[in-house]
Amino acid sequence: MPSWVPVPEVVSSCFAESDQGYGIVELTANSLSYRRHAFDIDNFLTAEEKKLPPFADFHAYLKEVFDRSNNLLLRQHLLKGAAKDLPEAAEMLKKMHWDFFTGQSYKSEAEIAAIYESSAYRTLLAAMPSMKSYISSLYESTQSSQKLDLTW
């Protein structure tokens, strides 16, 4: 047995304000299998409850809550003192957060390069150079957080 075994990190989801992701792990004597799923609240609501807000479109509601939280963060912390007209950069950062908090931040080298070459990324860094390492941290994953299979 090797003295060092890499330990993967799986970022599944923020259950309270994203798509309500969760993981199922199957473990055997020589393997581990992980699969990410999204909770479907509709299976637990009556027909009447499904008509009531926010359950009529619960996942859209959760996305709205997530976006409002991001907007607040951007206004109060990240864009404080920066140029006010950064909508493209703010939308890009919100998308990055959504991808990270729903376990979808794994990107190919080409996808990451396209992000780093985008005008939104350049605008964001021009306004807030300190964001470079933070954004880089969102794309550190070298594997999918949607499924994982390990054997030993």
Image (cartoon, rainbow, N blue to C red):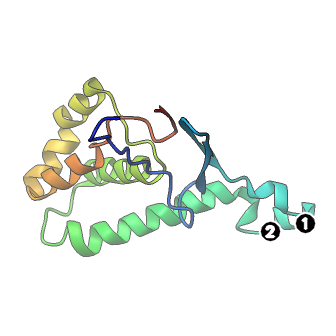
Direction right: furthest residue: 47
Q: Callout 2: 10 Å neighbours few (<14), some, many (20+)?
A: few
Would you name the residue on which mark 2 appears?
Answer: 52
Indicate the amino acid at tag 2: Leu
Label 2–label 1 contact, CB within 8 A: yes
The residue located at (24%, 29%) in the rendering is 114
Would you name the residue on which mark 1 appears?
Answer: 48
Considering only vertical position in the picture, is 49 above or below 19? below
Residue 90: x %, y % from top left: 29, 54
Front residue of 32/125: it is 32
Front residue of 38/63: it is 38
Considering the numbered disc 1 on the image, is that residue within a helix, a strand or a loop? helix
The answer to whether 16 appears left or right of 93 in the picture is right
Front residue of 128/105: it is 105
Where is residue 54, by image quadrant? Answer: bottom right
**Which image quadrant: the N terminus?**
top left
Front residue of 15/141: it is 141
The residue located at (68%, 59%) in the rendering is 58
Residue 137: x %, y % from top left: 24, 50
The answer to whether 84 appears left or right of 47 in the picture is left
Residue 45: x %, y % from top left: 85, 63
Indicate the amino acid at tag 1: Glu
